[in-house]
Image (tube, rainbow, N blue to C red):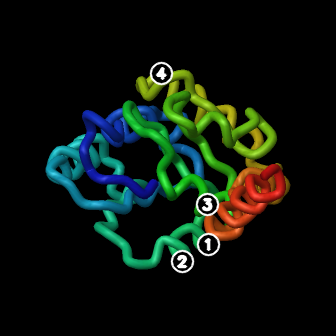
C-alpha cells in the first residue's frame, strides 16, 4: 500500500485489524505500508499489539514506487477517502492486480475478479472479505495482472498534448 499514514482517510488501521485474525496470521503473506503521516505511531502500536511485526512493515516514504510495485504481488488501496490515486494506475501499468474501495474513480478501473477486487467500503469486515476473495484467486494473480495492464492500456489517455492536438484539429476541420 502506498498512502499517507492517516487512518481517518486511508484506513490502514482497519487493514491491519482485518489481517490480525488467526486465519490471516497462519497464511504466507507480508504487508508493506509505504508512506509517512501523523498516525505512524498508532499503526506501529497496533502492529505490536496484534503481534504482526513479522507480517506488517512500515516502510516510510519511497522515491521509487515503480521498484516497490515491481516487487509486489498486488496493490491494496482499501481506503475511506480517495479520488483516483496515481498508485492504482501505476500498479496496473506494471501488470499488478489491485484491491480497492468503491470510492472515487477507482472502481472505474477494476472488474471484480478479472483485474482486481472492489471492497464496498473500508470497514474491517469488508476489507477481510475483499482480501479473502483475492486470496482465493492467488493462483490467478499473474493473469489478473495481465488484465490490469490491458485495462491500463485501454483507459489511460494518450499524451495530453496529442489529445489536445486532435481536439484542435477536429474543431478546425469543422470550420
Q: Secondary structure at mark 1?
A: helix
The Cα–Cα distance between marks 2 and 4, rounded to whole angstroms, is 31 Å
Residues tagged 2 and 1 counted as in contact (Cβ below 8 A)? yes
The Cα–Cα distance between marks 2 and 3, rounded to whole angstroms, is 11 Å
Answer few, some or many: residues within 10 Å of disc 1's Cα (few below 14, many 20 plus, some between 14 and 19). Answer: few
* Quadrant of the image occupied by residue 108: top right
**Which mark is first along the chain, 4 or 2?**
2
> Could you tell me which residue is drawn at 31 percent across and 47 percent down?
51
The residue that mark 3 highlights is: 91
**Which mark is first along the chain, 1 or 4?**
1
Any part of residue 175 in sight: yes
**10 left or right, relative to 144:** left
The mark closer to the camera, 3 or 4, is 3
The residue that mark 1 highlights is: 70
- Residue 107 in percent (x, y) is at 62, 34
The residue that mark 4 highlights is: 125
**Which mark is first along the chain, 3 or 1?**
1
Amino acid at each position: 500500500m502506498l498512502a499517507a499514514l492517516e487512518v481517518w482517510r486511508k484506513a490502514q488501521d482497519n487493514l491491519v485489524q482485518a489481517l490480525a485474525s488467526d486465519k490471516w496470521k497462519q497464511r504466507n503473506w507480508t504487508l508493506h505500508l509505504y508512506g509517512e503521516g501523523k498516525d505512524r505511531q498508532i499503526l506501529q502500536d497496533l502492529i505490536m499489539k496484534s503481534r504482526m511485526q513479522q507480517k506488517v512493515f512500515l516502510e516510510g516514504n519511497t522515491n521509487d514506487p515503480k521498484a516497490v510495485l515491481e516487487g509486489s504481488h498486488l496493490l491494496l488501496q482499501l481506503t475511506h477517502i480517495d479520488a483516483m490515486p496515481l498508485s492504482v494506475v501505476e500498479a496496473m501499468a506494471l501488470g499488478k492486480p489491485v484491491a480497492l474501495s468503491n470510492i472515487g474513480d477507482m472502481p472505474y478501473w477494476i472488474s471484480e475478479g478479472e483485474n482486481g477486487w472492489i471492497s464496498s467500503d473500508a470497514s474491517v469486515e469488508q476489507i477481510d472479505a475483499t482480501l479473502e476473495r483475492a486470496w482465493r484467486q492467488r493462483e490467478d494473480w499473474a493473469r489478473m495482472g495481465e488484465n490490469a495492464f490491458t485495462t491500463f492500456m485501454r483507459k489511460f489517455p494518450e499524451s495530453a498534448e496529442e489529445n489536445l492536438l486532435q481536439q484542435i484539429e477536429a474543431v478546425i476541420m469543422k470550420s
